[in-house]
Image: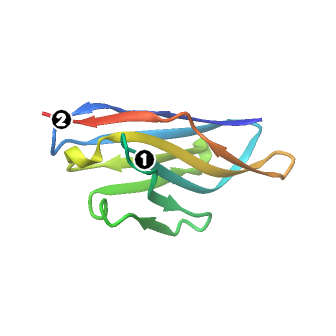
Amino acid sequence: QVHLVESGGGLVQPGGSLTLSCVASGDVFAIKDADWYRQAPGKRRELVANINVRSIITYADSVKGRFTISRDSMKNTVYLHMNNLKTDDTAFYFCHAQITTNQFQTSDVWGQGTQVTVSS
């Protein structure tokens, strides 16, 4: 089995920064594509950022220029660096990834999520 565990969420003032981490553990050979999603109360889950196996990156328009997704393949970790946070960024953030296992099978995995609250 493979697992994703997010960390780094918390309470931050508008204009502040946070970095979320998503660590893959278990029967992991490599992370292929990885995404960060978020869901605010009463709203649909939205894709925030994606980094594919070739490190091609896409962002939601609402976070372009403020958020940066990156990966550390040696640590099986994906990051979301968030700068100039706004109250509208308040949401539960989820990591999602396609992971190649040591048996060279592909697993589609979601993390449990971490809360980000932007408030003064």
Name the residue at the right extreme.
Answer: 103
The answer to which quarter of the image holds residue 26 is: top right
The answer to which quarter of the image holds residue 54 is: bottom right
Q: Position of residue 36 (x, y in %)?
A: 48, 51
Q: Amino acid at mark 1?
A: Arg
Against 39, is 25 above or below?
A: above
Name the residue at the front extreme.
Answer: 42
Density class for disc 1 (Cα within 10 Å; few <14, some 14-19, many ≥20) is many
Tally of marks: 2
Q: Mark 1 highlights which residue?
A: 38
Residue at image position (45%, 46%) is 79
Q: Position of residue 45 (x, y in %)?
A: 46, 50
Residue at image position (26%, 30%) is 11
Residue at image position (38%, 63%) is 60
Q: Position of residue 42 (x, y in %)?
A: 37, 43
Q: Is residue 48 left or right of residue 16?
A: right
Q: Is residue 43 left or right of residue 72?
A: left
Q: Mark 2 highlights which residue?
A: 119
Q: Is residue 4 left or right of residue 42?
A: right
Density class for disc 2 (Cα within 10 Å; few <14, some 14-19, many ≥20) is some
Residue at image position (53%, 45%) is 95
Tag 1 or tag 2, which sits nearer the N-term?
Answer: 1
In the image, 28 versus 47, the foreground residue is 47
Q: Amino acid at mark 2?
A: Ser
Element under label 1? strand
In the image, 103 versus 97, the foreground residue is 97
Q: Position of residue 77 (x, y in %)?
A: 55, 43
Q: Which quarter of the image is occupied by the N terminus?
A: top right
